[in-house]
Amino acid sequence: MTSDNSVGTVSLQYMTVAEPPDELVLDSGEKLGPVTLAYETYGTLNKDRGNAILICHALSGDAHAAGFYKGEKKGGWWDIMIGPGRAFDTSKYFVICSNVIGGCKGSTGPASVNPKTGKPYNLSFPMVTIADMVKAQRLLLERLGIDELLCVSGGSMGGMLTLQWVAMYPEMVRSAIPIATALKHTPQQIAFNEVARQAIMADPDWRNGDYYEHGQPRRGLAVARMIGHITYMSDASMEEKFSRRLKDKNYSFSFNTDFEVEGYLKYRGESFVRRFDANSFLYITKAIDYFDLSEGRLFPKGTPADTRFLLIAFKSDWLYPAYQSQDIVKQLKRRRLDATYCEIYSTYGHDAFLLEQKEQTHLIKHFLHKTYRGK
């Protein structure tokens, strides 16, 4: 794809979607309000408002899914997939992406000001779930005048949000494309998140979440990101990218950075600290761990549903192995729903959903065309 297929310059928008006394009632029973969501839109909503697509981001993502901010050269996190002629074709569809509540990119989260105290929420911010994030997104769509979605899609945590959408509001979702995701976290997946959380909380600069006047717990958050990034890649991709190459010709015989892979992880950790909030990392990873639509919870018996599904997994993804996507398909087939499963060969591991443009584009364009045409 060339730059001609980009949505071009975009801007972040904000909408307050819940104000007292109509706070957002969370799964925990607590109330949150007012709630602000940061979001972006691409393309044009048609007259019958039937071409809207909601894109859901992963753990460290945000509302900036496509296009470029003025003066910046780096595009949105899924820019290769969103734009004229791309998988989510903005010459046909109206695409929306919002930052989740609990996040740190414009939506209400632990760094936001608590209206009751005039200070950041810190750890007084209530625990949120994937379902709570979806509730907030629905309020945003209501404000935008959208009561039906042609499609909901996302990878990783974005896939969980996608599944939660059809579980909670099946009448609103005509089709869904969950990518590299699962119905629930396994103990191993929870364990990775817990080690990352403990790395943050063990940093003295975390200050029990009350660090905004002092600065981030940089070391703990960097280590948390390093742990996560290892799980996003595959053995094959790490071998191809780094092998055992040294930064210099010889070992340093010290604890300095000898191997290229060590330097890469440190770079990833340090860059993450500059763009993400440690408390948001804690809250969002906990929400992911709480997520569970297994055992028939996706579509309980008696729930009317005719949502079409395209599920995409990647052979080298060991963080969310393909069998977890297959488990989703099995649950859908038991309900006799229209579900197509595609497993893409890729050496990129879990990151493949962000990088494998060609095959995903082919699958998604065909699926959306068939869904939209069948209206």
Image: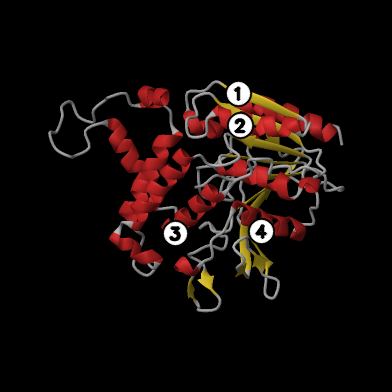
- Residue at mark 3: 279
Closer to the chain start, of discs 4 and 2, is 4
Q: Is residue 170 above or below residue 107?
A: above
Q: Is residue 266 above or below residue 197?
A: above
- Residue at mark 1: 343
Closer to the chain start, of discs 2 and 3, is 3
- Residue at mark 4: 136
Using the numbered discs, state the Cα–Cα distance from disc 4 to disc 3 in whole angstroms.
20 Å
Looking at the image, the residue that sits furthest to the left is 253
Q: Judging from the image, what secondary structure is the residue with disc 2 in?
A: helix
Q: Is residue 247 left or right of residue 6?
A: left
Q: Are marks 1 and 2 in contact (CB under 8 Å)?
A: yes
Type of residue at label 2?
Ser
Using the numbered discs, state the Cα–Cα distance from disc 2 to disc 3 in whole angstroms.
29 Å
Q: Judging from the image, what secondary structure is the residue with disc 4 in?
A: helix
- Residue at mark 2: 325
Q: Is residue 125 visible?
A: yes
